[in-house]
Each structure stands twice: as structure tokens, then as C-alpha cells.
Image (cartoon, rainbow, N blue to C red):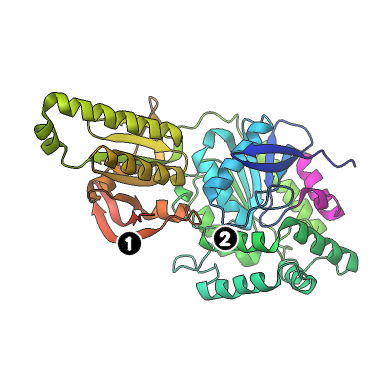
Amino acid sequence: MEVPDVRYARSGDVAIAYQIVGSGPPDLVFVRAYASDLLSTWEQPLLVRHVLGLAGFARVLMLDKRGTGLSDGMREVQTLETRMDDLRAVMDDASIERASIFTGQSGSPLATLFAATYPERTDALLLLEPMVRGTWAPDYPWAPTEEEWRRWLSDVRAAWGRRDFLVELLAEWAPDAPQTLEFRDWFVTHMRRSLSPGAALALFRTTMETDVSGVLPAVRVPTLVLHREAERQPAEHFAQRVADCKLVCLPKLRGAFTWLDDATHELTMRACSEFVASLGSGAARERILATVLFTDIVDSTTRAVELGDEGWRTIVGRHNAVVRSLLAAHRGDEHDTAGDGFFASFDGPGRAIACARAIRAELARLGLEIRIGLHTGECERVDGKLAGIAVVTGARISSLASPGEVLVSSTVKDLVAGSGFAFDDRGEHELKGVPGTWRLYAVADG
């Protein structure tokens, strides 16, 4: 068949390459897990069969993530929030209002975060062996340890792009791949076109630092999880934490690719097409993942007495103007103000932290010291406002912040891995009216 034309969407200053295959509705966004190169995809008949199988029941949007394939190259670690912005930009450019998202392994945290943040744009998730954490933890023992990651990153730094290294990688990732020179040649070329050595190192570092465990309860869209029998436990771990999730085992799958084996390919296509066909009308969902921000002027009563009524009204007016200007610049939504503090929300924690730091710096120039608290969690929309335990949690965190401090929950810290933000551990705390104990972190200066 004729290779679909490559289009480009702008995400900030970065161009993201994508193709459209088939017709819809419904629409489905296909995000490759690690590496992708749109053009060499069409040079592998087995992978083409996979794409056309998806296009048999949906219009398929395929993209090269930033730093991969035909999209603009990046050598630094990319945050999930940045990749989420890229996905939204591609959907906007293709005039796709809402879609199901098909991905797997290291691509699943992006899809998970997108679905929780934008449920109104996500019909469903179709995930192959979704990853929750990149690095081993007592409650997630299936991920590599830090030592294993160090060895792997050292190997990638030294050998990515070499033929012998990539052939060994093929044997590990796809033990059922055709044992032909032609297939090995294609795989080596595909991986080289997908990722430069620097981009490969950055991508695997991002994977290592990823943790979306705090996001799973906020996923409210129908979810299909495909898995090997050998990976049943991590698949069940994911499914038990997502409200509406169906598990399907692929008994013949041995590696990372569902498109090599005829039986696995057919079972994958049947499970996905039936799942998409079973979806409802996509009614508006009123629960979303958001990062809430609370600010408070330190010693406001004392300052009001010092300045007098008129002086205090003037300084509060300047304070409000600064905060509102910076909220607009960072895509924040104002929900409430109580004289000397703001309650706002963001669709990404990185933007919330950047906004909080900017607010703190600008208000310091006015002689005002503030405390700020941030938390990311599931919120409920009520008459256009946000409510729920996540909002209460953010307010409680703000009340514990020291003067001049931006204090965040561990969920916020985990979601901005790779952003360059540094944090100082403030230990565990009990938050009034919020169950459990919470580890909090102060955003370091810099």
C-alpha cells in the first residue's frame, strides 16, 4: 500500500511527526513504547500488518515521540508532562477531539497520565503490560533495581547503535522474531533511525525515573490490559488500581511485540476491536487529575496593621495582579481567592511548580513573603470548581509550608522526574482530615 503522508504538529518549539491511517470514528492513537520511526515502520510487513489491523476498526494516528524518529531530536530527559503536551498537540493538529490510546510497557505511563488528566479526550486505554514504576520498590518488585539500571545505562552509553548490541537486544526483546538476516537488518536500521545514542540514553533515564503509582486511582476511563502469562502479576497490580479495567492474557506471547506471532496478532486485534466496539457514547466525565496550588501571605494580619487599611488594599491588589498574571502565563486556572491567598489548578505538576516559584520570586520584590502548597490528585468538578480530598490535601500541605517555601507531596515530586527540579525531604506528616501519613518535599532554590 502507499505509505501515508507524514504531517507535523507544533508542540511549543518542537515539531512532532505523525501519520493517519484508516478512517473513523472511532479514533485511536498508537504510541510506540520505546523507539519508533514512522518511515521504517512501513518497511516491515509484520509491523504493517499490525498497523492495518488497528486501522480495521479505527482511524489510527501514529506519532514519533519527541526525540525519536522523524520528530525533532532531544538529548535531555523528557518529562511525562512534556510528552502529554505533545500528544495533545498532535490530536489538536489532526482535529481529533477524543480517542482511545494504544501503547504498552514504557509508553503506558504517558497514556495513564493523559487519561487521568484529560478524561474528556480519552475514550479508553489499550495497554500491553503497562509499567507503573521504572525502578524496583518493595510494593513493585518487577522493575529493575537501581544497580541494574546503572549497568544498562552504561551499556547504552557505550554501545547504542552498534549492530552487535542491537542484535542482542532483538534476541532479548523478541525471542520469536524471524531468524533471518533480512529481519535483523530491518531491526537494526529501525532502531538507529528511531533513537540516536544520546536520545536513547535520555529515554531510558526517563523510564528509570518514572512513577505513576499515585495516578492510577484517578484513571476513570475503560481500560484493557494485555499481558503474557509470565507478566500476570504486574498486570494484575495495575488492574487492581484502575476502576474499570479488563485483563486479557496472550498465552503465546514471549517477548515485547504482539505482531510477530500469527496467533498472538489475531488475539490482540480481536480483543482490541471488541473492546473499542463495546465502548459507550463517551459522556462527559466529571472527575479529573489535577495539580492544585494554594498560596498564603505570611503574617498577613501583622502586615495589614502596619500598613493600615488603604496601604494593605494597595499591596493586596498588587499581589492579586501578580498571581493572576503568572497563573495565566503558566496555564493555571483560578478557583478561589480569600483576600491573602489563592486556590488554583494546573493540568501538569511541572507548570504548577514553575508558577509557584515565579509567584514567590515576584512577590518577594513587593516585600511579601508567601507559603505555597502543591498536590496532584483526583478532583471532582462541581459547578466549574474543583473539590474532593485532593483539594483538601493541597490546602493542608500549604498550611505546613514554612515562610518562603514551596511544599509538595511525593506524588508531585514523582511526576516531575526528569524536569530538573530538585527537592529537599521534609519527612512524613499527618494532614488534618486526610487519611494516612504523607511524605512532603520542599522545592529547592535554583
Residue located at (53% from left, 52% from top): 79
Q: Position of residue 152 (x, y in %)?
A: 61, 72
Give, as a single range, the part of the protein colored magenta: 37-56
Residue that lies at the very extreme toward the front in this rendered image: 365
In the rendered view, would you say 432 is above or below 75? above
The residue carrying mark 2 is 207
Residue located at (35% from left, 52% from top): 409
CA distance separating discs 2 and 1: 23 Å
Q: Position of residue 138 (x, y in %)?
A: 44, 69
Residue located at (82% from left, 57% from top): 262
Crowd tier of the residue under label 2, counting other residues whose Cα lies within 10 Å: few below 14, some 14–19, many 20 or above: many
Residue located at (76% from left, 52% from top): 37
In the rendered view, would you say 266 is above or below 285? below
Q: Which mark is residue 48?
A: none
**Quadrant assignment for the C terminus:** bottom left
Image quadrant in which you'd find residue 154: bottom right
**Of the residues shown, which amino acid type is indicated by label 1?**
Asp
**Of the residues shown, which amino acid type is indicated by label 2?**
Thr
Q: Which mark is residue 425?
A: 1
First in sequence: mark 2 vs mark 1: 2
What kind of secondary structure does the magenta stretch mostly adopt?
A: helix
**Viewer-nearest of labels 2 and 1?**
1
In the rendered view, would you say 178 is above or below 406? below
Crowd tier of the residue under label 1, counting other residues whose Cα lies within 10 Å: few below 14, some 14–19, many 20 or above: some
Image quadrant in which you'd find residue 329: top left
Q: Position of residue 202 (x, y in %)?
A: 60, 60
Contact between marks 2 and 1 (CB within 8 A): the answer is no
Of 78 and 41, nearer the camera is 78
Residue 215 is a magenta residue:
no
Image quadrant in which you'd find residue 258: bottom right
